[in-house]
């Protein structure tokens, strides 16, 4: 397993946000983190790369406890795509080059620039390379952040709602690209996502969080009318469309 | 979209060309500053020809009029360079780590704290006295030391607020204004308690004035500026990461808390040294970084070099104007930076942003 999470708990002050989270992710696997607002999806992701310090539990990356790793070592193995970030007056190339920061010393080398180019091409945003980030649309900026995480060349990429600002065309294209990159390079991705059908279409495994705890976890079979009612408090029908399940809310 | 061969590295090449453009701009800035140094050294009550200034500077010739150049003019010119670049660098770092464009040594209350410290030395320690006609600060070292101590105190207050509380970076500037107002009240109290001689000494200290410069104070400022500039350049990529937000920076392996505290400590120390010697010189800590951001964007690889250069250029120009505008009277430059800095800053805000 690339990622082993065991008993991870985190509280803000005395309010528990996530409790006793245990699961793992293998090579080439996309794991969807599902749950309602406030269920702890973002908190869970941030505990993995130690943006937040979990009060209990262990996170092992390729067998190494993240608590024994320096921040820069964690950044070399885990990429992070936040849902929102502040937009600074730097070019897209500059921002994607930041993904190489954990790898280079005083200044980027030729190989780093190549990685940036590769990432720009993978996400198909090479035409934005010299645009200033503060002139981009929300969706374009989101793609820049994904490109930066790819340039970071980590073993695991943590995505927090990576397609929330994208139109349906770009959403499908980006998810397809992410899936291709993860499968091809045998990395892992953890994706916090709201769109159940998007998750069903592109992810391999599903973690359903309810009030900070794992309610259900596993393959597509865990996305059932019963589990969704419990987790999201809505009535849905799960139907089969062209061989894949699809979630449709019912009134 | 144009046809591009991914193996030719088209984006990287375009990017390198773009970066070279910025490097050229930095070189031009440095050249403009060098020219300004020659011009400023030649201007004064005795007008010296550029050629003579240049040859005296290059040949380290301190004889004849070379003495004016070296011991009078150059000290002051170098003071403008060092003070301008220090304040501007401090402002850049403070604005980055606090992620607030209003952060500067002045707006964070450091200047007020230093002024209060100076007034305490003058009133309570009797460091200000008068000779027959002119008011002087007799024990200059005590005044500077006291000013420094109090600016450290305000730095400590700001740092403690940063470390101990969950106060947001944005609120830090508000806290700085509050701290500044406390010290301003203290300064007013000291002025009220002072006798007329002490009062004159306080007021004359408060004017930011480069006329107090001597080789020793320049040495102290230079030896604070150089390591801090190097240190900030060393973490220039961390600053760039920080610009995308704290979480993004952490995700890129930046120790954000250490960067914020270290950055505040270094920039506060640097500006404390400067204001302790030279008093309140407003706006340079805002103007320098903001002009640099207009020209270079948010990339700290360039900001951390360009902002000190611009701060030096602006303060040197202002001081040269202050020396000559009412000849033979020499105005403290602090008056001029406040007077001209305000409108200049507003026009900067109104002007279109350039990348």
Image (cartoon, rainbow, N blue to C red):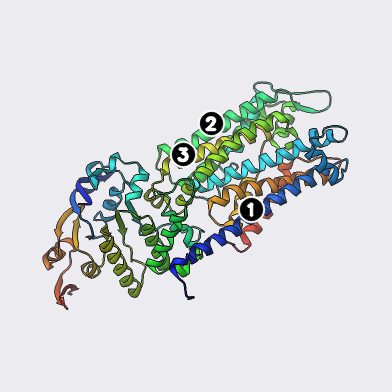
Residue B199 in percent (x, y) is at: 72, 30
Q: Which residue is mark 2?
A: B153
Q: Chain of mark 1?
A: B
In terms of secondary structure, where does tag 2 sit?
Answer: helix
Label 2 close to label 3 by CB (< 8 Å): no
In this view, B131 is above or below B316: above
Q: Nearer the viewer, residue B220 or B279?
A: B220
Whether residue B195 sits left or right of residue B50 in the image: it is: left
Query: What residue does disc 1 label?
Result: B26
Residue pictured at 16% horizontal, 65% vertical: A228
Q: CA distance from mark 2 to mark 1?
A: 36 Å
* Neighbour tally class for label 1: few under 14, some 14-19, many 20 plus, Cα within 10 Å: many
Q: Are marks 2 and 3 on the same chain?
A: yes
Please indicate whether residue A33 sits to the left or right of residue B128 in the image.
left
**Foreground: disc 2 or disc 3:** 3
Quickly name the residue at label 3.
B261
Cα–Cα gap, marks 3 and 1: 29 Å
Q: Is residue B26 visible?
A: yes
């Amino acid at each position: 397993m690339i990622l082993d999470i065991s008993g991870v708990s985190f509280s803000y002050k005395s309010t528990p946000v996530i409790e006793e989270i245990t699961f793992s992710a293998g090579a080439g696997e996309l794991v969807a983190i599902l749950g309602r607002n406030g269920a702890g999806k973002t908190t869970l992701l941030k505990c993995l790369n130690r943006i937040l310090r979990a009060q209990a539990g262990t996170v092992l990356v390729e067998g190494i406890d993240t608590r024994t790793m320096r921040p820069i070592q964690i950044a070399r193995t885990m990429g992070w795509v936040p849902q929102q970030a502040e937009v600074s007056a730097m070019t897209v190339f500059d921002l994607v080059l930041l993904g190489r920061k954990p790898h280079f010393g005083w200044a980027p080398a030729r190989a780093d620039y190549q990685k940036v180019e590769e990432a720009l091409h993978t996400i198909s945003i090479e035409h934005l390379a010299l645009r200033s980030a503060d002139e981009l649309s929300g969706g374009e900026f989101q793609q820049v952040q994904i490109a930066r995480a790819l340039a970071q060349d980590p073993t695991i990429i943590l995505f927090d709602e990576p397609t929330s600002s994208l139109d349906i065309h770009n959403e499908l294209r980006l998810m397809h690209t992410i899936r291709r990159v993860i499968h091809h390079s045998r990395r892992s991705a953890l994706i916090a996502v709201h769109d159940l059908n998007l998750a069903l279409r592109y992810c391999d495994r599903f973690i359903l969080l309810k009030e900070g705890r794992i309610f259900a976890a596993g393959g597509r079979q865990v996305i059932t009318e019963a589990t969704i009612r419990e987790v999201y408090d809505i009535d849905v029908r799960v139907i089969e469309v062209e061989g894949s399940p699809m979630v449709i809310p019912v009134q | 979209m144009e046809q591009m061969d991914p193996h030719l590295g088209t984006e990287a090449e375009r990017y390198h060309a773009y970066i070279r453009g910025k490097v050229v701009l930095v070189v031009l800035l440095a050249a403009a500053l060098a020219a300004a140094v020659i011009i400023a050294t030649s201007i004064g009550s005795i007008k010296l020809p550029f050629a003579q200034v240049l040859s005296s500077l290059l040949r380290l010739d301190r004889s004849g009029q070379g003495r004016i150049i070296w011991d009078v003019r150059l000290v002051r010119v170098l003071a403008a360079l060092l003070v301008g670049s220090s304040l501007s660098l401090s402002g850049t770092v403070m604005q980055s780590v606090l992620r607030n464009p209003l952060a500067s040594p002045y707006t964070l209350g450091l200047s007020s704290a230093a002024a209060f410290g100076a007034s305490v030395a003058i009133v309570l320690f009797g460091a200000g006295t008068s000779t027959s006609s002119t008011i002087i600060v007799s024990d200059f070292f005590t005044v500077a030391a006291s000013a420094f101590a109090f600016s450290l105190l305000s730095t400590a207050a700001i740092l403690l607020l940063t470390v101990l509380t969950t106060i947001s970076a944005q609120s830090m500037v508000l806290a700085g204004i509050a701290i500044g107002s406390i010290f301003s009240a203290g300064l007013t109290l000291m002025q009220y308690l002072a006798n007329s001689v002490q009062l004159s000494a306080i007021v004359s200290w408060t004017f930011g004035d480069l006329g107090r410069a001597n080789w020793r104070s320049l040495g102290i400022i230079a030896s604070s500026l150089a390591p801090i500039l190097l240190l900030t350049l060393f973490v220039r990529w961390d600053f760039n990461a920080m610009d995308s937000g704290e979480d993004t920076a952490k995700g890129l392996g930046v120790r954000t808390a250490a960067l914020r505290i270290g950055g505040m400590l270094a920039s506060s120390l640097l500006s404390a040294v400067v204001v302790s010697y030279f008093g309140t010189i407003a706006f340079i800590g805002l103007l320098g970084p903001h002009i640099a951001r207009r020209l270079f964007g948010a990339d700290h690889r360039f900001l951390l070099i360009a902002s000190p250069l611009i701060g030096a250029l602006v303060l040197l120009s202002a001081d040269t104007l202050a020396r000559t505008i009412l000849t033979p009277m020499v105005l403290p430059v602090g008056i001029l930076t406040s007077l001209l800095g305000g409108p200049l800053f507003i026009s900067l805000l109104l002007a279109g942003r350039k990348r």
